[in-house]
């Protein structure tokens, strides 16, 4: 728990002390722009470098456990990106961060790779249905809320 407090202090304290909040911030792929900063510069920070730093704060792996460590690390990276974007109006990381659907970790290895391919392929138009189909193929039960997260307002045929 002490680790969480340290990480939150590192990330949130500078935001609280900030006077400026950006104009716009999209959480879809966490890309940010602001009218008052002109042409946005390419971020130089690597998500991997920040991840390695966060992992170094927990050498005994009490927070980043085998079971939930990856989820926690990704959550912290997304929160860092959002808070940085809110303060500076531009992304923190040079890489684009993607959010995966609920229960993605229950998919077998082959379907996880297929899910990743679907999410990252810019030519696929009907991603929501394909992702929902992956869950159905493996008989993973989704709550109505999880279905809505995956399908959005789209209706199954």
Image (cartoon, rainbow, N blue to C red):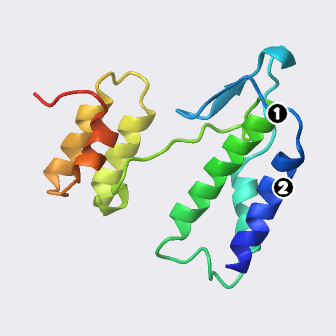
Residue corresponding to mark 1: 88
User: Is residue 140 something that shows in the picture?
Assistant: yes
Report the residue at 28% width, 28% height from top. 153
User: Is residue 53 something that shows in the picture?
Assistant: no
Depth check, front residue: 16 or 64: 16
From the viewer's perspective, tell me whether residue 99 is left or right of residue 63.
left
Q: Comparing marks 2 and 1, which lies closer to the viewer?
A: 2
Placement of 81 over or under 77, stated as above or below: above
The location of residue 119, given as percent across then percent down, is 41, 37
Residue corresponding to mark 2: 13
The location of residue 132, given as percent across then percent down, is 23, 41
Placement of 49 over or under 66, stated as above or below: above
Most distant residue in the left direction:
157
Report the residue at 10% width, 27% height from top. 157
Report the residue at 72% width, 41% height from top. 93
Q: Secondary structure at mark 1?
A: helix
The location of residue 43, given as percent across then percent down, is 79, 34
From the viewer's perspective, tell me whether residue 21 is left or right of residue 125.
right
Task: Pick the quarter of the image with the N terminus.
Answer: bottom right
In primary-sequence order, the first of circles 2 and 1 is: 2
The location of residue 33, given as percent across then percent down, is 72, 22
Placement of 53 over or under 146, stated as above or below: below
Depth check, front residue: 74 or 108: 74
Q: Residues within 10 Å of mark 2 (few under 14, many from 20)?
A: few
Report the residue at 30% width, 62% height from top. 106
Q: How many marks?
A: 2
Placement of 50 over or under 99, stated as above or below: below
* Gap between marks 2 and 1 measured at Cα: 14 Å
From the viewer's perspective, tell me whether residue 152 is left or right of residue 121.
left
Q: Residues within 10 Å of mark 1 (few under 14, many from 20)?
A: some
């Amino acid at each position: 728990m002490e680790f969480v407090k340290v990480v939150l202090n590192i990330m949130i304290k500078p935001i609280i002390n900030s006077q400026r909040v950006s104009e716009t911030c999209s959480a879809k792929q966490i890309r940010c722009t602001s009218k008052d900063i002109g042409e946005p510069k390419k971020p130089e920070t690597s998500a991997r470098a920040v991840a390695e730093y966060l992992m170094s704060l927990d050498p005994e792996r009490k927070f980043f456990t085998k079971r939930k460590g990856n989820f926690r690390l990704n959550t912290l990276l997304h929160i860092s990106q959002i808070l940085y974007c809110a303060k500076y109006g531009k992304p923190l990381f040079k890489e684009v961060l993607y959010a995966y659907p609920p229960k993605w970790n229950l998919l077998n290895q082959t379907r996880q790779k297929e899910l990743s391919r679907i999410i990252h392929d810019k030519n696929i138009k009907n991603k929501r249905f394909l992702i929902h189909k992956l869950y159905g193929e493996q008989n993973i039960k989704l709550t109505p809320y999880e279905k809505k997260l995956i399908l959005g307002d789209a209706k199954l045929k």
